[in-house]
């Protein structure tokens, strides 16, 4: 029994001793695969992603955005859905309708629309994709609208009404959704 615990204890001691313990404290094994916290930056969602029973009359694969709940649902088989927390448009910027995902982009560039620049002339005219970009790790473009489902480097805004009409998710959640849907996916936005 003592031999069983000896190797793991020795490994922990070695890691703790390396660089005065700094290596052990700063190491996250997910970084090896390029998928750790510093990859997504922005932290975990204040509203955890969960699988729930879902009674909507939508085909599996449909995305349903409920702006009043500040939740996005990806309809699954067998009366279930994945439920994600989202940030939605602030007063005067919420909308409803049915669209399809017309494009998907990883680490998208951001060019604020002219309407946004008129309200916020301090914004950059264009911003390359990356960790500081407000569209985050992934973006799914909705029809011919100016709106997207996109990541965010501000996880504290999830569950809030702060955007100019787009739907914000944590980078972790938007990457998960992005991997599950394709161009052409139906998106139903309920604004009640």
Image (cartoon, rainbow, N blue to C red):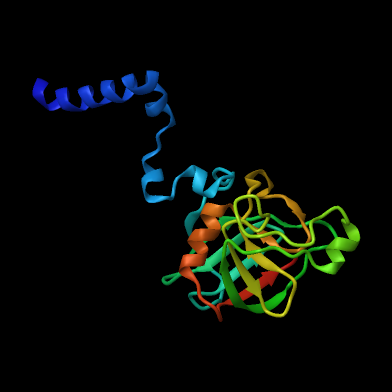
Q: Position of residue 124 (x, y in %)?
A: 79, 57
Count of marks placed on residues: 0
Left or right: 60 in relation to 73: left
Q: Position of residue 56 (x, y in %)?
A: 56, 71
Q: Nearer the viewer, residue 34 or 148?
A: 34
Residue 1 in view here: no
> Which residue occupies 56% across, 45% down?
41
> Which residue occupies 86% across, 52% down?
122
Is residue 33 positioned above or below 14 on the image? below
Q: Nearer the viewer, residue 38 or 68?
A: 38
Q: Nearer the viewer, residue 35 or 140?
A: 35
Q: Position of residue 125 (x, y in %)?
A: 79, 61
Residue 118 in view here: yes
Q: Position of residue 39 (x, y in %)?
A: 50, 48
Image quarter where the C terminus lies is: bottom right
- Can you tell which quarter of the image residue 2 is in? top left
- Can you tell which quarter of the image residue 113 is in? bottom right
Q: Nearer the viewer, residue 88 or 69?
A: 88
Image quarter where the N terminus lies is: top left
> Which residue occupies 60% across, 76% down?
103
Is residue 110 positioned above or below 145 on the image? above
Is residue 76 positioned above or below 169 on the image? below
> Which residue occupies 60% across, 55% down?
130
Left or right: 118 in relation to 127: right
């Amino acid at each position: 029994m003592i031999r069983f615990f000896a190797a793991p204890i020795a490994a922990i001691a070695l890691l703790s001793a390396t660089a005065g313990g700094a290596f052990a404290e700063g190491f996250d094994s997910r970084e090896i695969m390029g998928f750790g916290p510093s990859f997504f930056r922005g932290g975990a969602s204040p509203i955890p992603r969960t699988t729930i029973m879902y009674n909507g009359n939508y085909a599996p694969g449909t995305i349903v955005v409920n702006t009043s709940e500040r939740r996005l649902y990806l309809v699954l088989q067998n009366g279930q859905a994945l439920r994600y927390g989202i940030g939605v448009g602030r007063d005067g910027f919420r909308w409803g309708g049915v669209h399809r995902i017309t494009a998907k982009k990883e680490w998208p560039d951001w060019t604020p629309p002219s309407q946004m620049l008129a309200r916020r002339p301090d914004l950059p005219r264009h911003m390359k994709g990356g960790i500081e970009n407000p569209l985050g790790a992934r973006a799914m473009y909705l029809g011919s609208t100016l709106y997207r489902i996109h990541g965010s480097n501000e996880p504290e805004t999830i569950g809030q009404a702060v955007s100019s009409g787009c739907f914000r998710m944590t980078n972790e959640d938007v990457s998960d959704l992005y991997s599950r849907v394709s161009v052409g996916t139906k998106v139903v936005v309920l604004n009640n």
